[in-house]
Image (tube, rainbow, N blue to C red):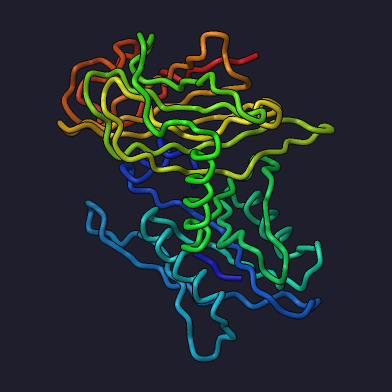
């Protein structure tokens, strides 16, 4: 194991932590093919990059994994190292421990159990380096004990999802972009009516009067089964630009499966004149009106004491997120 130094998957909390100067602390879980062994795998080499704070004191900035000649590293682990390093730097994360699973085709994953336990004890994020098939086994972790799990995607998986999503849109004949008809909210999730094989389209709708840029949606579903908390695999989708008066296709909402979970959709976006927004909506099942408001709060930009939809006051001139408007439909 490897030690290092802070925490959260929620994008708004992450922004706050970055502004407060506190790095995120994480435990990283790697996977590789090989023969099943009993002893614990040695940790990989991580180094921590340091910066000076406003008092010119050294403070941890982010960790990076560094491969050495003595390490037994194959091509798959090398790809995971690159993916993890990019994520650690982007999210200013400090690695406090790492675990490596030897995938031999069985279902037992003792290293994951140890990583999950360590993350729970340390109050850290658990970063899954890859969920791809290794030794014939894919890996889809569930949420337990309130440990935040972040699954990274490699280039192959991203390409597969892009093709899959393209095929899905063609198969369902759903438009990528729709024109809104009398939207009741400035920013909202909108359920289309084109039912196909038990699924309906879910759109992010923009009626703010300005186009939204760099729209990113993170989603995570949770429920209780047999007295235990279980959850879906976290998802992050980048929708790019959404013009005002338009809706952008987010996903195919499965009426049978998705309605078993309370799904939280976290949305971040920017505008042409600079302000950035973040907000959350919770959905158990599509509401009768087909609309669920996303109460976006302003993070940066001009101070006007109002949120993007005029319903959520902000602190004058504040650059910090205020979660005044967590909205949605609960059943």
Residue 8 visible in the current orientation: no
In x, y percent, where is residue 238?
A: 39, 43
| Viewport quadrant of the N terminus | bottom right
Image point (48%, 14%), residue name: 291
Q: Is residue 272 visible?
A: yes
Drawn side of residue 179 relative to residue 189, left or right? left
Number of marks drawn: 0
Percent x, y of residue 20: 33, 42
As drawn, 255 above or below 66: above
State whether residue 82 is above or below residue 302.
below
- In the displayed orientation, state which residue is furthest to the bottom: 69
Q: Which quadrant of the view contains residue 131?
A: bottom right
Q: Quadrant of the C terminus?
A: top right
Quadrant hosting residue 187 = top left
Most foreground residue, 209 or 52: 209
| Residue in view at x 49 percent, y 40 percent | 170
Residue 261, horizontal then vertical, whole percent: 67, 29
Q: Is residue 57 left or right of residue 222?
A: left
Task: State the image coordinates of residue 176 (x, y, percent, origin top left).
Answer: 40, 34
């Amino acid at each position: 194991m490897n030690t290092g130094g802070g925490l959260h998957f929620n994008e708004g909390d992450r922004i706050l932590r970055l502004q407060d100067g506190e790095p995120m602390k994480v435990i990283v879980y790697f996977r590789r093919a090989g023969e099943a062994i009993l002893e614990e795998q040695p940790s990989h080499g991580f180094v921590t990059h340091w910066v000076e704070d406003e008092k010119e004191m050294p403070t941890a900035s982010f960790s990076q994994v560094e491969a050495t000649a003595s390490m037994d590293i194959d091509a798959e682990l090398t790809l995971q190292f690159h993916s993890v390093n990019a994520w650690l730097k982007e999210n200013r994360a400090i690695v406090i421990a790492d675990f490596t699973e030897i995938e031999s085709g069985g279902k037992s994953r003792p290293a994951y159990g140890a990583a999950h336990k360590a993350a729970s004890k340390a109050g850290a994020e658990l970063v899954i380096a890859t969920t791809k098939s290794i030794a014939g086994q894919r890996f889809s972790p569930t949420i337990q004990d309130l440990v935040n799990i972040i699954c990274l995607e490699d280039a192959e998986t991203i390409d597969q999802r892009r093709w899959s999503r393209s095929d899905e849109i063609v198969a369902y004949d759903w438009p990528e972009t729709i024109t809104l008809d009398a939207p009741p909210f400035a920013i909202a999730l909108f359920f289309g009516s084109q039912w196909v094989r038990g699924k309906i389209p879910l759109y992010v709708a923009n009626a703010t009067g300005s186009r939204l840029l760099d729209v990113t949606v993170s989603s995570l579903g949770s429920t209780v089964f047999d007295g235990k908390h279980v959850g879906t695999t976290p998802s992050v989708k980048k929708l790019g630009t959404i013009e005002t008066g338009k809706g952008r296709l987010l996903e195919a909402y499965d009426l049978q499966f998705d309605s078993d979970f309370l799904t939280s959709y976290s949305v971040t976006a920017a505008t042409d004149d600079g302000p950035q927004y973040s907000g959350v909506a919770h959905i158990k099942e599509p509401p009768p009106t087909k609309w669920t408001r996303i109460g976006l709060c302003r993070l940066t930009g001009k101070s006007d004491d109002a949120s993007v939809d005029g319903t959520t006051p902000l602190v004058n001139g504040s650059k910090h997120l205020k979660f005044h408007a967590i909205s949605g439909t609960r059943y």
